Image (tube, helix red, strand yellow):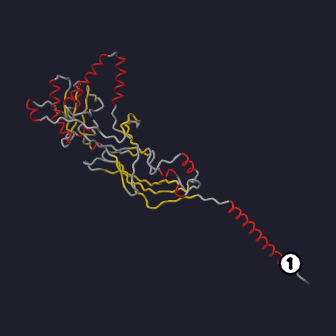
Amino acid sequence: NKWQVDEFGIRRGYEGRNFEQKDILHDIHHDVDSLVANGIHVLPIDDGNFKFFVENHDYVFVDFYAPWCIWCQRLEPVWEAFAERVETDQLPVSIVNVDCVANKDLCSREKIMAFPTLRLFKKGVSQPPDYRSDRTVDALTEFIKSRLALDEQLERLDPQAKALHKERLINERKDHPGCLLAGFLLVNRVPGNFHIEARSRHHNINSIEANLSHVVNHFSFGPVLSKNIMRRIDDLPDQFFDFTSTQPMDNKYFVNEKLHQAYHHYIKVVSTHLDLGGRYRGKDAILAYQMVQQSQVMQYVEEDVPEARFTYDLSPMSVVISRKGKHWYEFITSICAIIGGTFTVVGLISSIMNVIFKPKKI
């Protein structure tokens, strides 16, 4: 399961179970050469004039792209045709693009995580969330018209209602790239690994901006133990079994101080059978998995997308902890042995004393 989280790690919205991104429609009938025959309608801007441009225009719709990105190449003729449609319909929106390879610092400041990123600015302020719907001229035009119509309606409201509505829209449109993952994996009892990385069916990830900082709320092997079993385990002395050893990564923070790096975790797993007697004995003994964990930061080359990697190794050996008590007859036998031993010792002492202090005949 996946949830979107805000900048404080609080869950905002449920994204779905085993979530798969929906398909995005693309126009495929546009040709750049024919579109620019009557002039180029998309204005390229760069780090030198970006801030001035977006602050001095009411609306600016920006395509942050990378020339090597296959999705950006597919979008290029559509974006040009869309810009021509905007001019034809006389919409008060400037359609521009930014080459993020030539303007790395600008795209880093704007936190461009993937290509293409389509972002609307209003008087110099970005209007989240970024556009992620169909990449067709009709869909893009409809998006712009709906946003213009919504802003026009807001301007007609009284100041108090306008402020409340804008605050609600800001909260709804907050777009934080963090997410919360919860679930389980079925793995074979052999060494293996799994990894978490940013991926999109319709974008190329900007690898140098990928931030894999994460918090491990809970991580363990094996089934979740019931409260009754937990109470039985808590009765064990810590020197024999400490339950925290089954989840040593819980509530730990792994923060990347620099971009383009990620934590790799190495985990040694040992199965532990707790034979506590009663219903939890023999084949019904409690099964837990103790872990020893070590983590280190790995640096990636510029072309690779960082990933949080979890490598585990399940030991072929097992630990068995059993609790055994004595039967009542064993207790009685021990008492009798003590009594018998005491009687024997006393008899020996008495014999020795008799020999020592026995009166001598004259």
Q: Residue 293: x and y, percent?
A: 43, 53
Determine whether, in the image, residue 62 is placed left or right of residue 350: left
The residue lying furthest to the bottom in this view is 362
Along the viewing direction, whichever of 43 and 33 lies nearer the viewer: 33
Determine whether, in the image, residue 337 is placed left or right of residue 24: right
Using the rendered view, name the quadrant where residue 118 is placed: top left
Q: Residue 53: x and y, percent?
A: 21, 28
Identify the amino acid type marked 1. Answer: Lys
The residue that mark 1 highlights is 358
**Residue shown at the point (28%, 39%) measured from the top left:** 113
Compared with 1, 234 (above or below) is below
Q: Residues within 10 Å of mark 1 (few under 14, many from 20)?
A: few
**Residue shown at the point (36%, 25%) measured from the top left:** 168
Using the rendered view, name the quadrant where residue 135 is placed: top left
Residue 153 shows in this picture: yes
The residue lying furthest to the right in this view is 362
Determine whether, in the image, residue 212 is placed left or right of residue 250: left
Residue 239 shows in this picture: no
Quarter of the image containing the C terminus? Answer: bottom right
Quarter of the image containing the N terminus? Answer: top left
Q: Residue 42: x and y, percent?
A: 16, 31
Using the rendered view, name the quadrant where residue 206 is placed: top left
Q: Residue 49: x and y, percent?
A: 20, 32
Compared with 48, 59 (above or below) is above
